[in-house]
Amino acid sequence: MCSSAVAFAVLAAVFCSVPVSVQAGPRLNNRPIIGILAQEIISGDRHARGSSYIPASYVKYLESAGARVVPVRINRTNEEYVTLFHSINGLLLPGGDVDLQKSQYSRVSKIFYDLAIKANDMSDYFPIWGTCQGFQQLTVLTSGKNLLTLTDTKAVALPLTFTPAAQNSRLLKSFPKDLLQSLSVENITSNFHSWSLTLQNFSRNMRLRRFYKVLSINTDGKKEFISTMEAYRYPFYAVQWHPEKAPFEWIEKSGMVHTASAVKASFHSAIFFVSEAMKSQHSFSSPIEEEKALIYNYSPVFKGIGSVFMQNYYFD
């Protein structure tokens, strides 16, 4: 496997050969609405009240930064997704545990990913954020294959090892310096994944190398994997760690961190993505349609203090 020094050299070479990112217009939308993609119910969820769910922590995460949320429900038609795409100002792909190539989660992700690529190419700004499983899904969509590797990263908190590209990244340059310092030396990024994109697999895949800028890496002690990245030409962002867990999930489990630095990292990442959504001018066809779509029409279910997700929204 590549050493950090060799890997950084490879990444640095890639950084110098790709185009600059999309630039948005000056007009901002101060009432952003962001979609969160639902996914199939986890087997054994005795609280399930439907066929799909969204953890409430992701909803709170976006609301804490000044956005409203619309659930993007699975098992809908392509036409319905196209209409919804032109109504919302960004999409969040949350963590979970579904098949990244055969699930409804993956199907709907691809529809929105393709629509976002086309829109941004036409200067119609539309950001996408992927967390954990969402990070992994974006790598599959971009590369056209599953390049993930098993790692020992289930329920562990880690510091981030920033790459040379991090300093001038769109995502991290907005973070306060003291927070970046905390992220680099404190165990405050929560990892709850068994699969990762290793630096080696990333470096070997031309599609990924040309599409994404690697901002941070981590290691499980044996394998180096990518933990934060952003696209070069598109407002797409992905973290393998969970910024939403620090302020909103409370299970007593290794890897769960609630320090001030961890909460601050959550807030600043949410603020950044919501600020990206503010650059989108999409809107619903009417106030009535907007009201019908909002998450406020649904009630979260409390699953108990021993649950990985404290609350879920469920959908038919």
Image: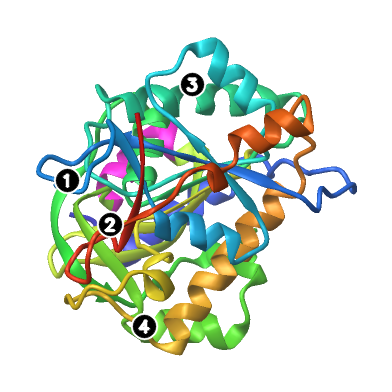
Residue depicted at x 31% and y 38%: 204
Q: Are marks 4 and 1 in contact (CB under 8 Å)?
A: no
Write down the residue under mark 2.
225
Q: Position of residue 116 (x, y in %)?
A: 61, 29
Amino acid type of the residue tagged 4 in the rendering: His
Label drawn at residue 149: 1
Amino acid type of the residue tagged 1 in the rendering: Thr
Residue depicted at x 54% and y 20%: 81
Label 2 SS: strand
Mark whose residue sits in front, 4 or 3: 4
Q: Position of residue 152 (x, y in %)?
A: 12, 62
For the residues labelled 2 and 1, the Cα–Cα distance comes to 9 Å
The stretch in magenta equals 199-208
| In the rendered image, the vertical position of residue 201 relative to residue 72, given as above or below | below
**Quarter placement of the C terminus:** top left
Write down the residue under mark 3.
111
Q: Are marks 4 and 2 in contact (CB under 8 Å)?
A: no
